[in-house]
Amino acid sequence: MYACMRTTLVLDDPIFEKAKKKSAEMGVTLSELTTAALRDFLFAKSAPTGNRKRFLMPVVGESEIIHQDPQELARLRDEGR
């Protein structure tokens, strides 16, 4: 199982332009925007809106447990950390 997989997506030009603009407005990468949109779409039916449990991932080695949300982990991954 991969923690992260690179792939190629074929997007219509208008969708690509709108997604690129939206990601810039939100201050995230196109990869982060695409991942978040797919995650929301794929898991929307498995958990009723508002009842989703927040994904918490403890980071080992710190004096206290630190929880990071998936978007923060994706940002760190994209930065190469």
Image (cartoon, helix red, strand yellow):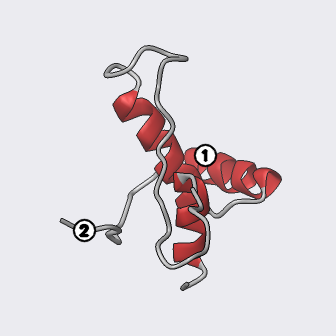
Residue indicated by mark 2:
2
**Residue at the farthest front position:** 63
CA distance separating discs 1 and 2: 31 Å
Q: Quadrant of the N terminus?
A: bottom left
Residue indicated by mark 1:
14
Residue depicted at 61% across the width and 46% down the height: 14
Residue depicted at 59% across the width and 51% down the height: 33
Query: In x, y percent, where is residue 11?
Result: 46, 52
Relative to 66, 42 lies left or right? left
Relative to 6, 20 lies left or right? right
Q: Residues within 10 Å of mark 2 (few under 14, many from 20)?
A: few
**Residue at the farthest left position:** 1
Tell which tag, 1 or 2, sits nearer the viewer: 2
Query: In x, y percent, where is residue 19?
Result: 63, 49
Q: Nearer the viewer, residue 6 or 20?
A: 6
Question: Vertical placement of 31 versus 52: above or below?
Answer: below
- Sequence-wise first label, 1 or 2: 2
Q: Amino acid at mark 1?
A: Pro
**Residue at the farthest bottom position:** 80
Q: Amino acid at mark 2?
A: Tyr
Relative to 20, 52 lies left or right? left
Q: Nearer the viewer, residue 25 or 75?
A: 75
Query: In x, y percent, where is residue 8?
Result: 35, 66
- Secondary structure found at label 2: loop
- Secondary structure found at label 1: helix
